[in-house]
Amino acid sequence: MPNSLRMGAALALTALCASVVAQPRQSPGETSVSVGLTGLNQFNTRIVDGGSFNWQDASANVNVTKQFTSAFSAGVSARYNYQNWSWSDPQAFGGQAPWTAISTPALGMNFGYSPSPEWRFGFAPTVEWSGETGTGTGGTATYGAVMSVARTFSKDLTLGVGAGVFRQIDETKVFPYLLVNWNITDKLRLGNSLPAGPAGGAGLELSYALTEQWSIAGGGAYRSYRFRLNENSPVANGIGQNSFVPVFARLSYAIDRTTRIDLYAAATTAGRLSATDSSGTTQYSTNYQTGFAMALSLSKRF
């Protein structure tokens, strides 16, 4: 599962229960470490009510998980995400850029419990601080947890359900999602495309192994995230929000058994931007046309 893909905090957020369930069980005492680096470019995208925007995204993450017993595992994770937005005549926001640079550091934990080889439960609390440059950490926190349960029916099929509950700055968000790990054939697999987290559920992707090293895939998910605006924003100390449905294609190359490069091309559909003032009144809200993005990700397991 492409844990390092980051569509702006939207294809973003550290791997939580979706990856906990999907990973094979380790031997007691073993510790696994994974790191990821990702760069993304959202090309110029038209705003329905006038103007356009583009943004670039860079992120880094590290995850450490230890199998304490045959049934119980626990881990910690850290991530830093940075977005840089550029605007052209944003008439939908009164002709002013509603935000520019957004920083999102995050910390998380994950717990897995398998009372039997067939069943696995996951719980992953996380907290992140998402705000425009200059806001500090006050009033920027998003916190909550993802919970999941999955059952392995055979060596080729694991199914489950999960739910996320998060307080996104000043709004509580609850979402259910499906967990799928289905090896339809030796080469064809249906699984979760993204890690579940504050921005949304795990999504789905269908992947095909071209060779032992090369694979292709296609999938999608729903993403939505909020961030605090600084005092120089046209909506001073307010809240920005970006919601969309990324539909993507992936080309992956396994350098070795623990190192992988993923190239993504994505259409960002059903996009919507909004800015809410500090009293909770929505000052601006507009849709944007389908955009195009590309991302390159490098992930490594130890």
Image: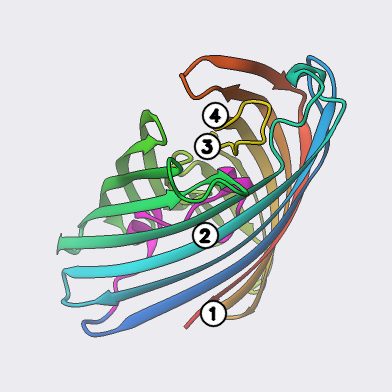
Residue range corresponding to the magenta coloring:
1-26
Residue for point 30% across, 46% down: 145
Q: Nearer the observer, disc 4 or disc 2? A: 4
Q: Nearer the viewer, mark 1 or mark 3?
A: 3
- Residue 235's x, y, as percent? 62, 26
Mark with earlier residue (3, 4): 3
Q: CA distance from mark 2 to mark 3?
A: 18 Å
Q: CA distance from mark 3 to mark 4?
A: 14 Å
Query: Mark 1 is on which residue type?
Result: Thr
First in sequence: mark 4 vs mark 1: 4
Asked whether the residues under the numbered discs 3 and 4 touch, taking CB atoms below 8 Å apart as contact, a structural biologist would say no
Q: Nearer the viewer, residue 223 or 85?
A: 85
Q: Which mark is residue 258?
A: 1
List x then y, in percent, for residue 270.
Answer: 66, 24
The answer to whether the residues at label 4 and label 1 have Cβ atoms under 8 Å apart is: no
From the image, give the main secondary structure of the stretch colored magenta. loop
Query: What's the amino acid at mark 3?
Result: Tyr
Q: Which mark is residue 231?
A: none
Q: Is residue 38 above or below residue 226?
A: below
Q: Residue furthest front?
A: 231
